[in-house]
Image (cartoon, coloured by chain):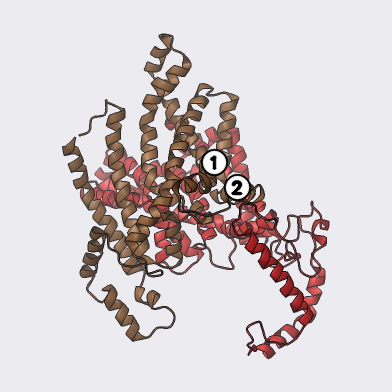
Amino acid sequence: MLAYIVRRLWQMIPTMLGVVLLVFLLFNWVGGDPAYILAGKMSNPEQIANIRRQLGIDEPVYVQLWIFIKQIVTFDFGASWSTGEQVSRVISTRLGPSLTLLIPLTILETVIAIALALLIARVRGSLTDRAVMIACTVGMSISILVYIIVFQYWLGYKLGLFPVQGWGDSFAHNLLRYSALPILILLAVSLAPNLRLFRTFVLDEVNQDYVRTARAKGLSEGRILWVHVLRNAAIPIITHVMSNLPSLLIGAFLVERFFSIPGIGREIILAVERSDFPVIKAITVYVAFATMLFNLLTDLLYQAVDPRVKLR
Amino acid sequence: MFASSSHLSPGLWTLAWRRLRADRVAMAALAVLLLFAAMLAASMSGWLANDWADEIGVHYAPPSFIGAQADAAHRTAEPAATEVPPENPLDPLKDVIRELRAEMDGASVAAAAGGEAGAEDSYGIADPLEKELAEIRGMPSGAATHVTSEKKTTLPFGADKWGHDVIKKTIKGAETSIVVGLVAALVATFLGTLFGALAGYFGGRTDDFFNWFYSIFTSIPYLLLILAVAAVLQQKGVTTIILILGLTGWTGVFRLVRAEYMKHKEREYVLAAGAIGGSHLGRMFIHIFPNISHVALVQMSILAVGFIKSEVILSFLGFGVPVGVVSWGSMLNEAQNELILGKWWQLTAATGAMAVLVTAFSLFTDALRDALDPKLK
């Protein structure tokens, strides 16, 4: 087990270096000279040379790459270009609101989608099944933007059931008051694709031999689905949920922007709008690392769920 | 699409076409797609909606089936400004807003009373361009009044803030969104197929390199990668957004095409092609590619659906199409503010058009996959 983890971590190093290299090339070559962005519209050659010296852009490329790697390892990306806040502080303070939103969302959406998928699997092939699947396809074809605009307008503004936007200091208040509508919207958006996917996972299992055996033993259909089938369908479901977690951090950016929630996603949008390269670079690199770690974690979870899986 | 490729390799494509013909949902979806294609061709060639930018209606003209009377009261001098949105009981700032509103009403009354006191604005600075502006204003005044008198009070599906016909705008927006989606899908499929072919066919070091490349791109969440590239490419434009989507979206195609090439390169027909002296490139793209092109086609249509959705989000955020180009995303961006004023038609038009296209496209893609690869079902 330990040997497996060490080997996987070792294998991650080339990919991590690749991500670092990609981000470095993107921002240092394609992006043009950041000194011109920093200096603003009124600039003179002296200022630009000064900024270049401060950023280390006048150094050779390998020195710049080394500076970037050092920044990643020490979590010190310097200050944001637009607000002057330390980038490490930006990330650590924005993580809390994002997680307040995303952890309840992930739990709710997984539980609801699994329950609905099992219910739909009971009536597979029927008219209800087909109608739900068509509703899912139509639901998926409407842009997430429309869900947010319409829900925010009707439930928040017209009916006044939820605050239109905002964020406070107390955790309970944030979770129950300000996160409620964003979570509801993201649930509505994610339910259709998840339900479709989980339904196929469940249907893959329903025709297996062990299900027939369980039926032959005289078990109730409910017990077969909720105990036998669910245990086996859990493996692809776990992969899906776990590997989606890091991208969810970014994927919630639209909701965070509409509801002014100070999370990672909103920070990325603001940073792109302001050409705030240090913030984008830091978030990209760390989210990529998190994705790789989560993939490893998923593989480890497999074994806990399915004893047949042997990690080698 | 099928007519042209069917005589290239009749077996697979004819069979697939027959299966597709039997699927009623697929044929309905195809009909909708052809309708969109015809609309696209008409609007690109300038027959349709070329004059979308003409301000033919009044400011926020409602759809004809509602009628003009709903708004008639405040169209005279100052539309929209007189319309006070209802107070939100949960808004912590509602008292402040009420005060501000009262102040503004007072101010506008005062301004009206002051009338044409002078060219000085509220900052007390005389406008240096005043004379030129007055000339410009005076010049087309005759024509302008002529046009305003002709402006319609209702339009078939309403008008936006500037009086553009929403239907024409939606058609023009469809052009941008669909072209971006299709061309970006073409770029991504081309890259994915090229990389996948090289990796799968040559194997060894080449394969290791492309796998490394693939793992880098997949470990950065897709949207984050798009936003990072958007931040770096400073200029906006249709080409930029096509490049962003195309350069980041090739990974899925790569994985599938690589697996297909690994399977095919050991097949006898490829070995035979090698024995009679076919070059590597010839074997890869003349012999193997026609046999895996259905995979690329299905992937391309999946990508096109995803890219149309992504383009809408990017344009909405302002990282997509430039100002002056209309797309469904920029329409939704305007519609967001219009909804608060109760002008729902632009939102409905863009949403409806997009939902119909994407639903038809996804249903057709599913059917296409089933028809081309019956094993997969």
Name the chain under label 2.
A
The crowd level at tag 2 (other Cα within 10 Å; few <14, some 14-19, many 20+) is: some
Q: Are marks 1 and 2 on the same chain?
A: yes
The crowd level at tag 1 (other Cα within 10 Å; few <14, some 14-19, many 20+) is: some
Residue A122: x, y in percent? 51, 22
Q: Quadrant of residue B126?
A: bottom right
* Disc number placed over residue A151 in the picture, else none: 2
The answer to which of marks 1 and 2 sits earlier in the sequence is 2
- Specify whether A105 is left or right of A19: right
Which residue is under mark 1? Answer: A188
Residue A304: x, y in percent? 28, 30
Q: Colour of chain B?
A: red
Q: Quadrant of residue A45?
A: bottom left
Name the chain under label 1.
A
- Residue B372 visible? The answer is no
Q: Secondary structure at mark 2?
A: helix
Q: Colour of chain A?
A: brown
The residue closer to the viewer here, B206 or B10, is B206
